[in-house]
Image (cartoon, grey):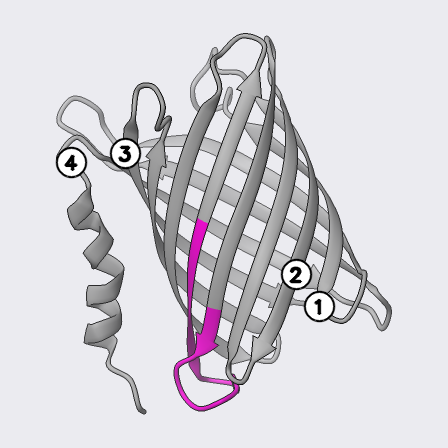
Amino acid sequence: MNFSFSKVFVLILLPFGLFAQDTRYLSQHEIAFNYSPPSRWSYNFEITNRNTFPEEDKPYSVQHLEFSHFTTYESGFYGSLSLGLRYRNRDWFEPGRSNELRLTQQYNYARNYNQYRLGHRFRIEQRFYDTETVHRARYRLNLDFPLQGLRLDDGEFYTAISLETLYSISALEKPELNQRFTLTLGNQISGTLKLQIAAECRKEDLTLDQENRVFFYTSAKIKL
């Protein structure tokens, strides 16, 4: 084994020092099913749950439950086009909060450079709420690579580093600019299962009332 868990742990925690004490902390847990038949098409289904950490005046709480689907078409050697549908239910856990229906159009370009894979992801989203529609553009730069050797084999670890910029506009609110930085550690358990943990630092509403949030993620990705 040619890497140190302690170094990866320090790397994940390092960005938290950039945040103020009033940062909000949340956790998010996901299970994803991926189906890739012998064609250019592939399909993804996800179930996601988001929770808040207890605070001085607020107990632990569930924020929402989310169901997502993406259909993807491989458009070339390195590119793909996707169409996504997401339903986020908030009302079950916080009565009065608007649920969300989201449509996503995506282009992804990823290319390998030896053991490193560099990816660019562009997304356009329409987020439908009870009282408004929010249009959002997103760009993510992502680098992932195995931590043991030149390729990822069963039982081995990998990591990913990503930086994403988001810009939202709507008729009822002023434009909003967000920035996200994510560090991920994963393990290829087998040819059909990956497990991941991640930490994400979010700088939200940079041009107006800036807010800091830190997310801790766990996910299981199952290949059907």
Name which of mark 3 and mark 2 comes first in the sequence.
2
What residue is shown with label 2?
109
Seen in the picture, residue 112 relative to 181 is either above or below; the reply is: below
Front-most of residues 118 and 156: 118
Within the image, what quadrant is residue 14 found in? bottom left
Q: Which mark is residue 20?
A: 4
The amino acid on which the numbered mark 4 sits, given as a three-letter code, is Ala
Q: CA distance from mark 3 to mark 1?
A: 34 Å
User: Is residue 12 in the magenta section?
Assistant: no
Image point (38%, 54%), residue name: 182
Amino acid type at mark 2 = Tyr
Evaluate if marks 4 and 3 touch, with contact meaning CB atoms under 8 Å apart. Answer: yes
Above/below status of 114 relative to 181: below
Which class describes the residues within 10 Å of circle 2: few (<14), some (14-19), or many (20+)? some
The CA span between labels 2 and 1 is 5 Å
* SS class, disc 4: loop
Q: Earlier in the sequence, mark 1 or mark 4?
A: 4
**Which residue corresponds to mark 1?**
78
Label 2 secondary element: strand
Q: Where residue 144 sits: x, y (%)?
A: 47, 70
- State the extent of the magenta-drawn residues as a range: 144-163
Amino acid type for the residue under numbered disc 1? Tyr
Marking on residue 212 = 3
